[in-house]
Image (cartoon, rainbow, N blue to C red):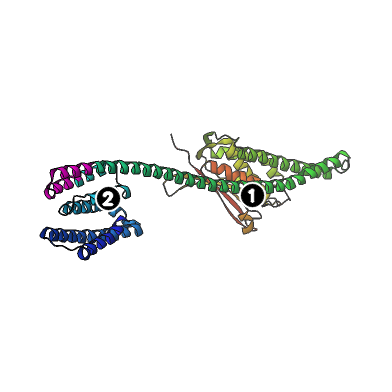
Amino acid sequence: MLSGICVPVALVLSVTYAHGIDADTVSFIDWKKHILILNFIVGSTCSILFVLSLIAYYRPQYKRSFRHLPHVLLLVVALWGTICTIYDQAVTTSIIGFLIICVVCSLILLIKPLQLVVYLLIIYLVFGIGMSQTQQDPAILLSNLSVGFITLIICLALSTIQWRGNLRAFKQRRVIKAQKRELEENYKALLESSAQLQEVNQTKDKFFSILAHDLRGPISSTLALTELLQEGMFEEDELERKRMYKLLQTSLFTTGKLLENVLLWSRSQTGNITFQPKKIDIYETLEANISLLKIMAAQKDIQIINLASTDLSICGDEDMINTVFRNLISNAIKFTPNFGKIEIVSGKKVDDIGQEHITIAVVDYGVGMSDKTLQGLFRTDSRTATPGTNNETGTGLGLVLCKEFVQKHAGDILVESKVAEGSTFTIILPASRKS
């Protein structure tokens, strides 16, 4: 801004000196000539500085290259006023031009106090040397030098006060800007958390409504069967009585499994399940879970074939792994027709970063699933449970647990299925490191 002001000022002064002042002596003519030349040089220099400052203002990428412009402008304008005052001594004893220029530069241009001290010393040195050459009266010379020195001290004090005030204001603006940005980020995070919480609540509400509906069925069936047995409806028909007992057992098993999964899921959601890793033998763990489900498989004459390798092991939580295996095998039994079979196979694979993983696949040759059903698996907000081949009921919560527990082991679970051909659930888990 100062460079833009100096250009018209230099032009006005040049016109005034050229046409408004008549020179009638040799010294006056020399003074006028020197002033016009100086004004032309300073005006041209300020024009260039003004253009550069505009470039720096409108082209931020060049701002760093022009960071020294205020320093150059201070020296140019201050020396302009100083040299004009020195030449003025030929026609007057006034140093008002020097005083005005120094005060204006100190107040308008923001320069660090230590740097300003150096610049003011240079200006005063030029002022003192020039005054000693043009002012012949010792008394006037001493007076001008004293006034000039005091003026520079005042300019330094004013500039320091202004610098500190601007620095304090800059720090306050930066703090306010940072606080505003932090508030905006916190507000954005709060909105996201609120939206996520609302979505979670809606998901849980929908899940519990599904759960209540599916839990009501087996409980109602159990109550109805116990009432019939209590009334002695099947005492004379042994085959029918055995069938009722089998239905009662199935209903109780389904209810028990459902409640077990609900308890595990609720503990998982509240963080009450602790992860306790240990070395787990895959084959032995599968055998233990197959034994637990033998009665369920025998009711449908289903053969469970464990083809897993006997030398595979992982480092994981035994309870979680048992829950995963138990849910996947019971799920396969549910959707396998009578006299069918289920195969459990294992393998090894290495990922892109060279880490070895173990795969365990539970393969059934049952009813399979459609693409729409596959898309809704592992979700609590959609009803993906379908009746089994013997109308077994469920909620699909077991698969949700499987997904969560496998992910706690830094693993993944994949599903492949075709309608009327069967399904394959594949678990991928990091292999335990050999000690």
Q: Which residue is mark 2?
A: 100
Comparing labels 2 and 1, the label whose residue is closer to the camera: 2
Mark 2: which amino acid? Answer: Ile
Drawn side of residue 163 relative to residue 226, left or right: left
Q: CA distance from mark 2 to mark 1?
A: 103 Å
* Residue 144 among magenta residues: yes
**Residue 52 visible from this viewpoint:** no
* Residue bounds of the magenta highlight: 124-149
- Residue 201 at what x, y percent from top left? 65, 46
* Residue found 61% across the figure and 40% down from its top: 269
Work out which residue is located at the far front of the displayed protein and give it. 24
Q: Which residue is mark 1?
A: 341
Frontmost residue, 132 versus 415: 132
Is the N terminus in the top left, top right, bottom left or bottom right quadrant?
bottom left
Frontmost residue, 357 versus 239: 357
Disc marking residue 157:
none
Drawn side of residue 192 relative to residue 386, left or right: left
- Residue 6 at what x, y percent from top left? 28, 58
Frontmost residue, 145 versus 427: 145
**Residue 363 visible from this viewpoint:** yes
Q: Which secondary structure type mostly characterizes the magenta part of the structure?
A: helix
* Residue found 63% across the figure and 47% down from its top: 198
Mark 1: which amino acid? Answer: Lys
- Residue 220 at what x, y percent from top left? 80, 44
